[in-house]
Image: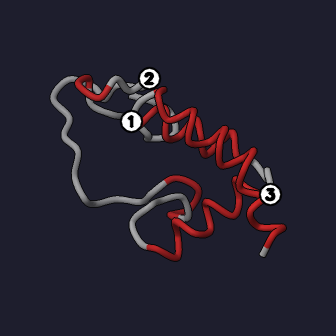
Amino acid sequence: GTDDGVCGLDEGGAFATCDQGTYCLLIGKNPQHDFTSFDNIASAMLIIFQVMIQEDWTTLMYFIWDAYTIWTWPYFILLNGLGPMFAIQL
């Protein structure tokens, strides 16, 4: 387990694997006072905006790494590099 409560299954290649005998359930709070999630479109858009303005985006990336896999880094790098250029064009 981890101190922040973010963990993932062994099959997914997560950095922080959950303790033996624990289960993934749809209960409990998401990280950062239930702010960090892709559970609905509004929350996902706020996270994308936060990454694009480069405000504490590495913390979000590490949460995703812990819960899912390290191979989400291309998403964050591309969003961080290309996202602001698209936003400026709007």
Mark earlier in primary sequence (3, 2):
2
**Vertical arrangement, residue 78 with respect to residue 39, above or below:** above
Residue 88 location in percent, x, y? 84, 67
For this rendering, which residue is in front, 59 or 4?
Answer: 59
Front of the two marks 1 and 3: 3
Q: CA distance from mark 1 to mark 3?
A: 28 Å
Residue 45 location in percent, x, y? 58, 69
Q: Residue at x 23, y 45 (%)?
A: 24
Front of the two marks 3 and 2: 3
Residues at badges 3 and 2 in contact (C-beta under 8 Å)?
A: no
Read off the residue under disc 2.
15
Mark earlier in primary sequence (1, 3):
1
Read off the residue under disc 3.
85
The quarter of the picture where the C terminus appears is bottom right
Residue 31 location in percent, x, y? 52, 53
Q: CA distance from mark 1 to mark 2?
A: 8 Å
Work out which residue is located at the far right of the displayed protein and give it: 88
Read off the residue under disc 1.
68
Q: Residue at x 79, y 50 (%)?
A: 54
